[in-house]
Amino acid sequence: MKRSLLVLLMTVSCLAGEPSGSWEPKVPLSFRALDNPLSSDPNATRAGAKLFQHHCSACHGQNAQGIEKARALRSPVVSDASPGSLFWLLRNGILRRGMPAWSHLPAEQRWQIITWLKSIQ
Amino acid sequence: MEEPGNLEISSFNVVGRPTSGNSFAASLLEIEYGIKAWWTTEVYLAGQTTAGQSTLFTGWRWENRIRPLMGEHWINPVLYIEFEDLNGADKTLEEVVGFDSQFDQAEPNAIARRERKHEFETKLLLSSNFRGWNVSENLIAEKNLGNEPWEFGYAVGAARPLRLKASPYACNLCWENLSAGVEMYGGLGTRHDFTLAGTSHYVAPTVALELPSGTTFRVSPGFGVTGASHPFLLRFAVSWEAPAFGRRVREWLR
């Protein structure tokens, strides 16, 4: 029993300690090439703003200005990233740096958030 | 998993009526905090009231959920480790394991409360997200720290928002805030007798309403499908989330 617990804790700590650098090089080509299917949807920006306030503003600030460790999102990190890369980031998060995965949000809502993020750059 | 720095306070409730016992209502008060994006910790306080008997505090649980893989996969595992200190009158039925049955809840509180249960519980929580559907498969292993064998159980479910795109307007009662699904849960016997025979199983539709204010309501009427099951269990929950709770406390303490 004690040995199993030790193995479990060691496995968890090794996996949790997985090194991570910048997120962009990790984005698979299949995601980078994705286009935002809602970029021409006139409602997507407003819906994205609403979703951002609900899910993201507690960490990134109401105007996406960034708070403490959470990045400012009005920045080249977002403006230079392809929509597909941002979609990958929302899906996977950067767990080791505190950014949760938002894969439980429907893909449509993640695209709406990205539409709004692109609109404020 | 709770987002890091967020605090969630929830009340999970269940109402049931064993065929050979009195109606009961049990409640779990949960305080959940996101420590890291991959680690959540929760404390539960449990109590119940049984018609014609008594109302009592039945114990507490402390659980931790750890997401071992840093990336998103088709199936995402979460390890769940819990210690619980409950008495035998606990009726919260948060999970069904081993040979748990409706007859356990028929025992009078005055007798059942004398039994102490110090249990260590692990779960492997597996979840997938596909086209708006959230599918979860949970395998449960529970060990009473007394001289009792491991008990096993499961819970599987699928749920989906009723609308995948968010509307551009602020709304409470709109389709995107409502989700519906179905779950099934039950016991799988013990290490010495891993079986479906004599175990209890439930099928339960689920409905949830998540309001933009951070309050979530969930209802799940469960129907027993074996003789050992309660014929009917009504589960309902209310959760309230305090975003950035950790940061606000740090600012307040400065």
Image (cartoon, grey):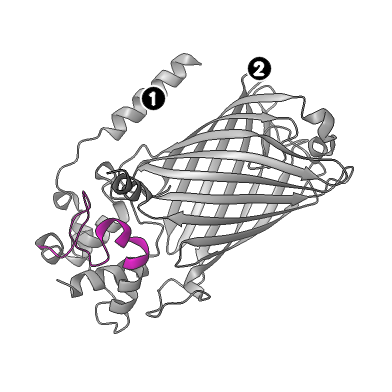
Q: Secondary structure at mark 2?
A: loop
Q: Chain of mark 2?
A: B
Q: Chain of mark 1?
A: A
What is the three-letter code of the residue carrying label 1? Leu
Disc count in the image?
2
Q: Secondary structure at mark 1?
A: helix
Q: Nearer the viewer, residue B26 or B233?
A: B26
Task: State which region is magenta.
Answer: A52-75
Q: In the rendered structure, does residue B89 fall within the stretch colored magenta?
A: no
Viewed as shown, does residue A35 lie left or right of B209? left
Viewed as shown, does residue A23 lie left or right of B10? left
Q: Which residue is mark 2?
A: B146
Q: Which residue is mark 1?
A: A9
Viewed as shown, does residue A109 lie left or right of B162? left
The crowding category of the residue bearing disc 2, from other C-alpha atoms within 10 Å (few below 14, some 14 to 19, many at least 20), is: few
Q: Are marks 2 and 1 on the same chain?
A: no
The crowding category of the residue bearing disc 1, from other C-alpha atoms within 10 Å (few below 14, some 14 to 19, many at least 20), is: few
The quadrant of the rendering that contains the C terminus of chain B is: top left
In terms of secondary structure, what is the magenta stretch mainly?
loop
Residue pictured at 51% horizontal, 44% vertical: B31
Residue pictured at 24% horizontal, 44% vertical: A97
What is the three-letter code of the residue carrying label 2? Gly
